[in-house]
Image (cartoon, rainbow, N blue to C red):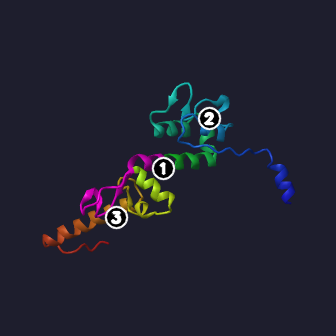
Amino acid sequence: MLSQFILCCSHFVYLLFSEFDSTEQVFVNAYPWLFPGGIGDVYDPRRGKVKDIHAWAKHLLRYHDGRFLQDQMFSLYVFNFLQRHTNNSQGNFFYKDKNFLGAYGGNPPTVEDLQQQLREGNMSYINKLRYLAKGIRGSDSFWRGKTEELEAWIDFHISRGNGPPTHF
């Protein structure tokens, strides 16, 4: 049974490349049956990178022959691609430390110091990084912000004498 699987699936070729590299055509290489002629990738060598990836994805999913929408793996990958790019563009990293900027006599670490710490296996700096993604719908930061808004609304109504909400 295993030999039959290997024989029937031996035509697959595994290529590793980064979807953030603008010289690679990720979609054309991963889904050649959807992009005949290698045209229409998010990174097209002739026209450059697509300006709005959300509009590009929407256009493909609504393409007149429906081939992009019918390919379930493509639809999932495009959604995942959009989520990762949205997360990378809307989130921010913050450094959380009481000694940062010399508050307690120490200077912030230099890039060389951080590289040396990482080479030695010291992850204390990495552990102090915080990722803030309040604008990314569904993230922990987003729901924490919504919880704070709801608690503020409840506190406001209680302070006005309206009592706690009862419709929850």
Q: Position of residue 66 (x, y in %)?
A: 61, 38
Find disc 3 in the rendering and name its residue.
Answer: 144
Task: Report which quarter residue 13 is drawn in.
Answer: top right
**In the depicted view, which residue is nearer to us: 67 or 2?**
2
Q: CA distance from mark 3 to mark 1?
A: 19 Å
The answer to whether residue 104 shows anywhere in this view is yes
Quadrant where the C terminus lies? Answer: bottom left
Q: Type of residue at label 3?
A: Arg
**In the depicted view, which residue is nearer to us: 126 or 74?**
126
Look at 22% across and 66% down and name the residue there: 152
Residue 83 circle label: 1
Q: Position of residue 75 (x, y in %)?
A: 58, 46
Q: Earlier in the sequence, mark 1 or mark 2?
A: 2
Q: Which residues are magenta?
A: 85-110
Find disc 2 in the rendering and name its residue.
Answer: 65
Mark 2, secondary structure of its residue = loop
The answer to whether residue 66 shows anywhere in this view is no
Q: Earlier in the sequence, mark 2 or mark 3?
A: 2
Q: Is residue 76 magenta?
A: no
Mark 3, secondary structure of its residue = helix
Q: Position of residue 31 (x, y in %)?
A: 65, 40
Q: Position of residue 131 (x, y in %)?
A: 39, 57
Relative side of 110 to 39, left or right: left
Q: Type of residue at label 1?
A: Gln
